[in-house]
Image (tube, rainbow, N blue to C red):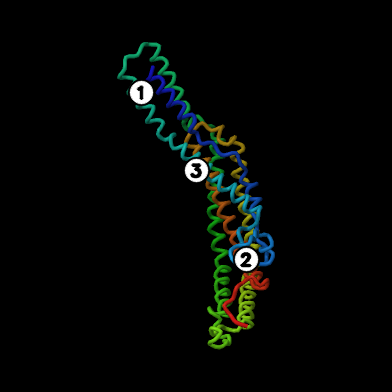
């Protein structure tokens, strides 16, 4: 009887480990990914900007909508990981079944027990699935989703390559902006030893203002350059995500597939495609927040929040 319970346990483990796709829409998720604006001021306006230490404003994130989506995506990524980890038992299920058979053969079993064991073994073998059980038209959908996912991988590489010149130019422009205000206010006239020899506040503020405005100009140019690129790639990504969504829908999230191998393959395409969305969102929100931070610096200066080491 204990042996029969062990066989039942193995059967349940196999059944529960099938990796059906998650209940989600890749296309709808991508649709919610925010695109940056074409200027630092516009990006700053959507960011979450609380007060930090020293009564200074700081950019916390790319805005409430982006933060909420990011939180949901992090949870979904955990769901993908948990489902994948549960699926690892699938690969060991056949070994467990073989061990159950060996242990059962070492015990004396009456005909009824042997019949029960054979029935459970047959059920487990059917649950494991094999390639011949699945219709070719269903497997074609799995490969179609895989092909679309390969397109996403190539799009990720192309996007990075297309953004690189704008990023390189931004680095150069920011380096030039930094030269306008050297550390410590060097170059500004000082005020005597009795006042600590601190640079003149009017000079320091003027140079900081010029430097911060130069930073903003650099980001304005960068934002205006990358926005149409990101808009185009969001459309290209969505096209491939729609194909994967459609394949998964036709396969009822994998429920129409018997083969554990093909179930896992379909699940992998969904998981990988979701990773592409996460990567794309990382790019867009980074543009929004870094651009917004340049405008935030200026706001802290013009609003008198920035404490400067200078003397009037």
As helix, strand or loop, the secondary structure at mark 3 comes to helix
In space, the residues marked 3 and 1 are separated at their CA atoms by 32 Å
Query: Which residue lies under the disc numbered 2?
Result: 55
As helix, strand or loop, the secondary structure at mark 1 comes to helix
Query: Which residue lies under the disc numbered 3?
Result: 81
Query: Which residue lies under the disc numbered 1?
Result: 101
The residue most toward the top is 111
Residue 93's image quarter? top left
Judge from the rendering whether residue 46 lies leftward or rightward of residue 105; answer left or right. right
In space, the residues marked 2 and 3 are separated at their CA atoms by 41 Å
In percent of width and height, residue 192 lies at 55, 88
Using the image as rendered, state which of residue 159 and residue 218 is in the foreground.
Answer: 218
Judge from the rendering whether residue 257 lies leftward or rightward of residue 227; answer left or right. left
First in sequence, mark 3 or 1: give its number: 3
First in sequence, mark 2 or 1: give its number: 2
Q: Is residue 8 above or below residue 189?
A: above
Closer to the camera: disc 3 or disc 1? Answer: 3
Residue for point 58% across, 48% down: 73
Residue 203's image quarter? bottom right
Quarter in which the C terminus is drawn: bottom right
Q: Is residue 156 above or below residue 85?
A: below
10 Å crowding of disc 1: few (<14), some (14-19), many (20+):
some
In percent of width and height, residue 112 lies at 40, 11
């Amino acid at each position: 009887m204990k042996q029969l319970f062990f066989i039942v346990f193995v059967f349940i483990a196999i059944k529960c480990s099938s990796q059906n796709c998650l209940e989600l829409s890749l296309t709808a998720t991508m649709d919610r990914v925010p695109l940056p604006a074409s200027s630092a001021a516009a990006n700053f306006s959507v960011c979450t900007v609380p007060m930090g230490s020293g009564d200074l404003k700081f950019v916390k994130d790319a805005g409430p909508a982006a933060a909420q989506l990011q939180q949901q995506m992090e949870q979904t990524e955990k769901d993908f990981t948990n489902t994948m980890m549960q699926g690892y038992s699938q690969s060991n299920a056949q070994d467990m079944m073989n061990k159950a058979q060996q242990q059962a053969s070492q015990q004396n079993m009456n005909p009824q027990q042997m019949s029960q064991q054979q029935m459970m073994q047959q059920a487990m073998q059917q649950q494991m699935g094999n390639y011949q059980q699945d219709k070719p038209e269903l497997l074609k959908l799995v490969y179609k989703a895989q092909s679309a996912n390969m397109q996403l991988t190539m799009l990720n590489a192309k996007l990075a390559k297309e953004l690189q010149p704008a990023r390189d130019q931004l680095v150069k422009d920011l380096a030039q902006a930094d030269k306008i205000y050297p550390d410590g206010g060097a170059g500004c006239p000082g005020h005597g030893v009795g006042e600590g020899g601190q640079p003149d506040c009017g000079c320091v503020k003027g140079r900081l203002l010029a430097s911060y405005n130069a930073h903003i100009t650099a980001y304005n140019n960068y934002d205006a350059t990358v926005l149409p690129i990101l808009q185009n790639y969001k459309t290209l990504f969505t096209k491939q995500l729609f194909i994967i969504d459609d394949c998964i829908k036709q396969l009822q999230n994998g429920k129409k597939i018997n083969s554990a191998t093909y179930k896992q393959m379909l699940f992998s395409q969904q998981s990988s495609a979701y990773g592409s969305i996460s990567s794309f969102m990382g790019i867009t929100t980074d543009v929004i927040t870094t651009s917004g931070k340049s405008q935030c610096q200026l706001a802290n200066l013009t609003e008198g929040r920035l404490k400067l080491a200078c003397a009037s």
